Each structure stands twice: as C-alpha cells, then as structure tokens.
Image (spheres, rainbow, N blue to C red):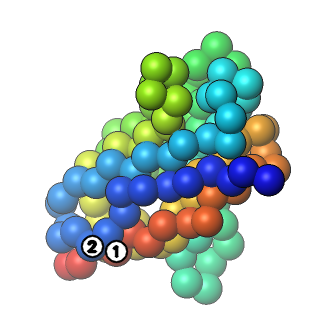
Amino acid sequence: QVMPVESGGGLVQAGGSLRLSCAPPGSIFSFNAMGWYRQAPGKQRELVAAIGTGGRTNTADSVKGRFTVSRDGAKNTMYLQMNSLKPEDTAVYYCNFGTYPGPYWGQGIQVTVSS
C-alpha cells in the first residue's frame, strides 16, 4: 500500500516559518477530505488543519491566523504553511487523507521550534 510522504520539517527559531508538503497515495482529487495532525510528547494526536468538500478549510484555534492548509492539484500535493511558529508548536506532524481522519497516514515529520 502506497503511503503519503511528508517533507519540509526541521528546526526553526520562534517566530520563524516552515512549509510542510505531503504527496497523497494516488490522485489528490480522489480524496474528499485531507488534513494535517500533530502529536507532541505526552499528548494526544490533534487536528491542526483540514480541507473538506468544496475546498472548505478548518483550522484549530491554537494555530488560526498562523497556519494555512492548501492543496495544489497540478503538483498533487497538500501543504501546511506555518508562520509565527511558537515553541508549543513543536511536535511530529502527520498528513492524512480520507476523512477526519482517514485511513492514509504519513510517517510523520518532526517540527521543532526553539525559544
């Protein structure tokens, strides 16, 4: 089974930016919902931002105004643009395709924000 593949994580200082990318397992148009989740040490995995039917987006209150989820059909890729990063954004980030969540999870990518 082909799994989603994330890229773009790393270490950044507080206030900085990163963009995560994720290639879906097949055509991005075959999924009516997709999103980004994150899991910090000792915490449950949580929804960060998602795209649903008609391209409507949903963003967690904790990142609203700082993170933006988008997709590019031509590049068959979903993105998470993360601006004004805070140390509390440090987590492993996962992309997901299918529903909320769907069955297709990426392997996870580390984002670390230093203070």
Q: Is residue 17 above or below residue 90?
A: above
Residue type, label 1 = Thr
> Going by the image, does 114 lie left or right of 3?
left
Left or right: residue 4 versus residue 87 is right
Asked whether the residues under the numbered discs 1 and 2 touch, taking CB atoms below 8 Å apart as contact, a structural biologist would say yes
Residue situated furthest front in the rendering: 1
Q: What residue occupies the far bottom of the structure in this picture? A: 42
Question: In terms of depth relative to the viewer, which is nearer, 16 or 94?
Answer: 94
State the residue position of label 1. Answer: 112
**Image x and y of residue 56, in percent:** 59, 21
Residue 42: give its label: none
Q: Is residue 16 left or right of residue 65?
A: left
Say which residue appears at 42% left-offset and 56% top-offset: 7
Q: Residues within 10 Å of mark 1 (few under 14, many from 20)?
A: many
Amino acid at circle 2: Leu
Where disc 2 sits, the SS reads strand
Q: Which residue is mark 2?
A: 11
